[in-house]
Amino acid sequence: MSNISYEYDDESLVEMCFCLQIFLVVSCQLFCTMEIFGFGWRMSFCSCYFFSSTAGPWEAGRNDCKNRDADLVVIDSTEEQFIQGFKDYYWIGLTDRVNEGTWKWVDGSPVTLTFWDKGEPNNGMGSNGVNHGEEDCAEKPAKGKWNDLSCNTLRRWICEK
């Protein structure tokens, strides 16, 4: 058996990388539109996102996502923190319901990158020292950083598939 070697110049490698990137983007777009038929879903960074138009408690949002064969969004990159489409306050898949103070994503993964707002998470303790009650679920404001909030608060949600 003979060994075959290939030599590429820098320009050829750049061209191949560019073609691979285009292929990946087109493949992701086809996944979103063909598998989910595009009804309210948007593609970004090779994931598909659904932004709900109705509001409900965190658990209702999670159940709706599961009914769509998805789950609440797991934000695990700086790029994902700034997904286009945020126009309101949305539930994300982050909670400390199981163990107070230990935030986990709905897929069970630990939080390795955070975008908490200043003073958050605070479990309901306002800056004036008043406790507003248990806050075990995380929301993502339109263009802001995360906030912990009572899971019974009505918010829209983002599903990710």
Image (tube, grey):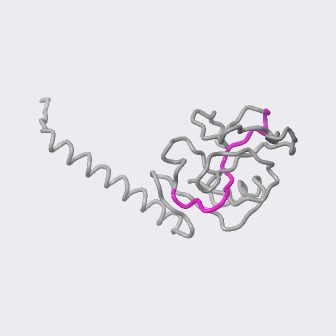
Q: Is residue 30 above or below residue 59?
A: below
As rendered, which of 126 and 42 lies closer to the eye?
Answer: 126
Lateral position of residue 145 relative to residue 83, left or right = right
As rendered, which of 35 and 159 lies closer to the eye?
Answer: 159
Residue 53 position within the rendered picture, expressed as x and y whole percent measured from the top left: 66, 68
Q: Quadrant of residue 112?
A: top right
Lateral position of residue 101 relative to residue 89, left or right = right
> Quarter of the image containing the C terminus?
bottom right
- Asked if the magenta segment contains residue 25, the reply would be no
Residue 74 position within the rendered picture, expressed as x and y whole percent measured from the top left: 60, 45
> Quarter of the image containing the N terminus?
top left
In the image, what residue occupies the spot 66% across and 50% down? 92
- Residue at the far front: name it: 128
Question: Number of numbered discs present?
Answer: 0
> Range of the magenta residues?
84-100
Residue 80 position within the rendered picture, expressed as x and y whole percent measured from the top left: 52, 48
Lateral position of residue 124 relative to residue 54, left or right = right
Residue 125 position within the rendered picture, expressed as x and y whole percent measured from the top left: 82, 39
In the image, what residue occupies the spot 65% across and 51% down? 140
Dominant secondary structure, magenta: loop
Lateral position of residue 137 relative to residue 112, left or right = right
Q: Is residue 79 above or below residue 69?
A: above
